[in-house]
Amino acid sequence: MAEYIVKNGFVVDPTLGVNCEKMDIAIKDGKIVETTELKSPKTIDASGMIVMAGAVDVHSHSAGPKVNVGRNFRPEDKLNYYKAKSGVKRMEAGFSVPTALSSGYIFARMGYGFVMEAAMPPLYARHTHEEMRDTPIVDEAALPVFGNNWFVMEYLKNHEIENVASYIAWLLRVTKGYGVKCVNPGGTEAWGWGMNCVTPDDPVPYFDVTPKEIIKGLIEANEYLRLPHSMHLHSNSLGEPGNYQITIDSLKCAEGFKANSDFGRDQVLHHTHLQFHSYGGESYGSKEFESKSKEVMDYVNGTDNITFDIGQVTLDETTTMTADGPFEYHLSHMNNLKWVNKDVELETAAGVVPFIYNPNSFIGVAQWAIGQELALLTKDMTKCHITTDAPNAGPVHRYPRVIKWLMSLKARNQILDDCKYGDSVRSQCYIGEIDRELSFYEIAQMTRVGTSKCLGLSHMFGSLKPGMEGDVSVYAYNPETDDDPEKIEHAFGNAKYFIKSGELIINDGEIISNGHKRTFWVKPGMELTAQVNRDVTERFKKYYTVTQNNYEVKEHHYVPNPYVIEVNAA
Amino acid sequence: MKKVELTIKQQPELYLETENITPDAFAGKSADEIAALNVYEGNVTHKLGDFFSIAGTPGATAADTQIVVNGNLERVKWIGSRMTAGEVVVESSMDMYAGAFMAGGKLLIKGNAGHFTGLGMTGGELRITGNAGNYLGAAYRGDWRGMQGGVLRVNGNAGSDVGSFMRGGEIIIGGDADVHVGTHQEGGKIVVKGNAKSKVGGQMVKGEIIVFGTIDVMMPGFAHRDNVDLEVDGTKATFKRYEGDLGERHPKSKGAVVYGQLYIKQ
């Protein structure tokens, strides 16, 4: 394998405590090494450029059945956004729901080396893995959803944590999943009865457990299994005005739990797209709706076992897709656009609706402001991660724009000044009081250090210290001489060089290799309990539309290049 | 106004996609630069000059440019698409997507136009002297934004799905329309001077459809309200006024529910 030396760049690596210092980075045999270990390296001249470890994404939807439904039912999403094949790169298409190939190229251009597909319906794990397999360059993993699963809810009703853990262990092995995702706990199952769980205390019909019991039970099982990642939560009442107290009540479920894992994380709960969960007021009107980001962050900043990602609204036309079935129904009746609703047997459900976040509307810009506030009010930046809940709050290729806003008060004021409701947003939200501008060091904490630690991958990603994976991103921005927010956005969206696992993927801004992407999955050590074994066999015979044999994700076909993380049971 | 004359000199083996035949693409260019613009045949990119001979020079701006296209253009698509100003005259029948997404200027087709003509157009004038195909002034597949502005006039008949998802502007059909007129219509006006078949105004939310002739099968979701005298495109007559589609959602304006309006000449 070729050796590389990235010379003279401004290196930003919070793990090493390095902040825009001129250093050389050496890569050999797919790993970062000391510069003295190189024999005849190829030189990459990074003078006047920012050098960071490859970025790690903690939550986006880029592969799987609901992403594909989005692609299928939105041909208009591709109408004006496509690029012809060129060189090694195949054709790209799609704005908010890009093709699998496009997704890989988009992440590479932004300097991302690892991406977490945030919601995998277990029954459609095969489809999800097929799409991840076809997404070039970036390493990926997927989180199966558990928050509305019949097995989980029945065991929790009887307080059988060991059986919950055993079932999770079995499902991760069978679906080649990475961790425990929980979407609208109980509410999506209630949707099957035409209902919802609006607060964490609303019992789920038939199962008679509450969202709180589901959240706590999944945290407990997750720590029992000592998984690399924590429980990953999308709490109840997403997007509803006045939901912030529901969010705080859900976050409080983590109280009393401590991380039990060998993978270096501190959190027991990751709350995703917190922006959608930090609303006050009683309607979306400009006199009613208000930000409660400060109240939510006052709680989060005071904890040491919670992380979150922001879910930044980017003010674009996009496609919403979630396992929160009742929410998508609600959304489709707000904007009267097309709607897909899907029930996934014993496991979950999903909905898909196109959505336009209008930069000239009060509510669009207020949602945008709340996302910014959450990040700007965070004390420990490694706990706060940049996402757009792609494509729900905005397309994934907007990450660089989110970075620009966080780093530039001028760019943020532009959004508020251009909107005719800018003053209403300033008075109903906290954005007008905040003049903080994040540094490259803090952006690296949010997109490298924090995310890799949160996923239990800080031994591989997020830093440039010797021994780490050879993932290096070089951005054409000079922190000493450049002072233009637009240039920040352009630089972070068009990596000048990108090395993935020691292989040069982007050379002088051009994609020159499709890489050797890996799919990560977690193999828990816990065996099946007799009861779970019996229940799974029986349920497949009785209820599932597929047999147990046709359910498993067979590695050789669906996961041709796996990276398996084995976890020892307690 | 300066004039550029194109004449097709070689027929494509497949169909030719010529979204660059617009005043906007031509303005300010020399004949050589125009000849070097891309056209597409299947997945192969060619030059405009490979298929057309070019005479005359365009104006400095689109508004000051007229394009006349001669020869048999029945295998040519997308002429005048996305144009914002100026004039295009097509001296032939042509294939699909003429004037798609056009925003301004004038496009005249002397002959028949294929499917998806005036797709999602937002402004300007589009005239067809012959017949139009299906999905005239409709929305692109999957989109909810059909014709939003401008005027689309057909002297002959139109195919099915006229004005699907139409949001604004005006479509006037001199002859008959096939099934599905104004499906999901949410604004704008469709005039059919001849007869319509069935499914007129299905799932219509807002806007107007005016039929001078007969409708073979009425949608059950339309209710007769009253009879009104109207002047439509220069003709004064009494029309039966229906409201619908009653099975669809309808917005409120000043406390009153707004329905789609369907008029049939008495």
Image: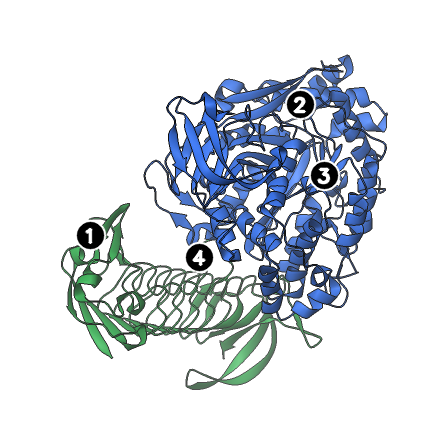
Chain colours: A blue, B green
Of residues B204 and A463, the one nearer the viewer is A463
Mark 3 or 2, closer to the camera: 3
Mark 1 or 3, closer to the camera: 3
Crowd rating for badge 3 (residues with CA inside 10 Å; few <14, some 14–19, many 20+): many
- Of the image marks 3 and 2, the number of the one nearer the N terminus: 2
Q: Quadrant of residue B178?
A: bottom left
Residue A297 locus on image (x, y percent): 77, 48
Name which residue type carries label 2: Leu
- Label 4 chain ID: B
The residue pinned by badge 3 equals: A307
Residue A171: mark: 2
Residue A91 locus on image (x, y percent): 38, 42
Residue drawn where x is 28% and y is 45% of the image: B43
The span from disc 1 to disc 2 (Cα, nearest Å) is: 56 Å
- Labels 1 and 3 in the same subunit: no
Is residue A434 visible to us here?
yes
